[in-house]
Amino acid sequence: MQISECQNYKPRVHFNGLTSKLRKTNPKCMEDIRDMFIKYQKSDGIAGSLPSSWIERISSKSKDEKGSAIKTIYAKIREIVQNLGDNASSKNELKKASKELTETMRKTGFLPKTNSVFIQERKVFGGVMSKALTIHEYGKNPSLQKLFIKKYIPHEDLPLVQAQNNGLLPELSLGLRMNYVHKNRHNLRIYWGDYAGNFMVSEYLQPVKNVKIPTRWSLYGCYNAWENFFEKLKKLTRDDKKISEILRNRGYIAFDLHDCNVMVCKDKKGLPVVKILDYGDILKLK
């Protein structure tokens, strides 16, 4: 990972190695992605980057200091996720984890002494997740991007039918590529994935209130049920095209987009937009 340094500093991060490889290639299978992590050992099992709002906090540090601070944060978040385990965490466990991360972020320059971070546990959806956490800043003028951590069930424990196109590696690989090659307002922003910790970190989204997404169950038995589902989403957000059309135009087809895998949020202009929350079972068309 290389951090740009110039007179008019902007918190941009330039990648080489593993992250660049995942963003620019289309692996044929899960094993290909795993081999990339094994090959690029210097990445320490990390692919992606911290949000720009986080990197901006350490803009005054030297190149080496920035790299060291970022590695320290990656390692601390990995340690916390692993220590919290897969079962429901108690309030005391989450409070302790929040305190530890706050102290580390203050020491590395990501947090001023007036501010802290708080870790919360969220409800788990889907058959491949074992735990969900959020990290957000509070205190004086909080500006750090709120993070959503999605911890996965170990790949070897997934049913065979899910193993190739679901779980950390397939979703991380496609998420990074969609954010880089196929940028559009419907993509969930993926920040980084941790192969050793078996989790992925993305932006945290809030759904628009009073917008009811039709459930997949309500569409079963209907002719062309999934397209009806996408058509209803299109009408809710007044988009020109359906999500399924947007994906096809970029060379992908989705087999598992439903009410638990998409969310209607607000974009930067405050307009409703459908966001893809889960990149599992989105396959590249040949």
Image (spheres, rainbow, N blue to C red):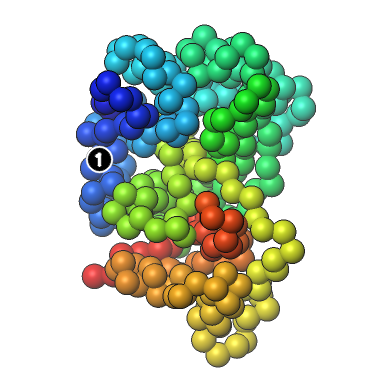
Q: Is residue 249 visible?
A: yes
Quarter of the image for the C terminus: give it.
Answer: bottom left
Residue 246 lies left or right of residue 31; in this view the side is right
Q: Is residue 135 above or below residue 68?
A: below
Residue 146 lies left or right of residue 217; in this view the side is left
Residue 147 on image: x %, y %: 55, 37
- 101, 6: nearer the viewer: 6
Q: Which element type, helix, strand or loop, lies under badge 1?
A: helix
Q: Is residue 235 above or below residue 60?
A: below
Q: Residue at x 54, y 79 (%)?
A: 231
Residue 229 on image: x %, y %: 57, 77
Residue 174 lies left or right of residue 263; in this view the side is left
Q: Residue furthest bottom?
A: 223
Residue 57 on image: x %, y %: 47, 21
Q: Is residue 275 above or below residue 150?
A: below
Quarter of the image for the N terminus: give it.
Answer: top left
Q: Is residue 82 visible?
A: no
Q: Which residue does the numbered mark 1 point to in the structure image?
A: 20
- Total residue callouts: 1
Amino acid beneath label 1: Ser
Q: Residue at x 58, y 56 (%)?
A: 270
Q: Residue furthest right?
A: 91
Q: Residue at x 29, y 54 (%)?
A: 181
- 194, 53: nearer the viewer: 53
Crowd class of label 1 (few under 14; some 14 to 19; many from 20; radius 10 Å): some
Classify residue 52 by image quadrant: top left
Q: Residue at x 52, y 25 (%)?
A: 77
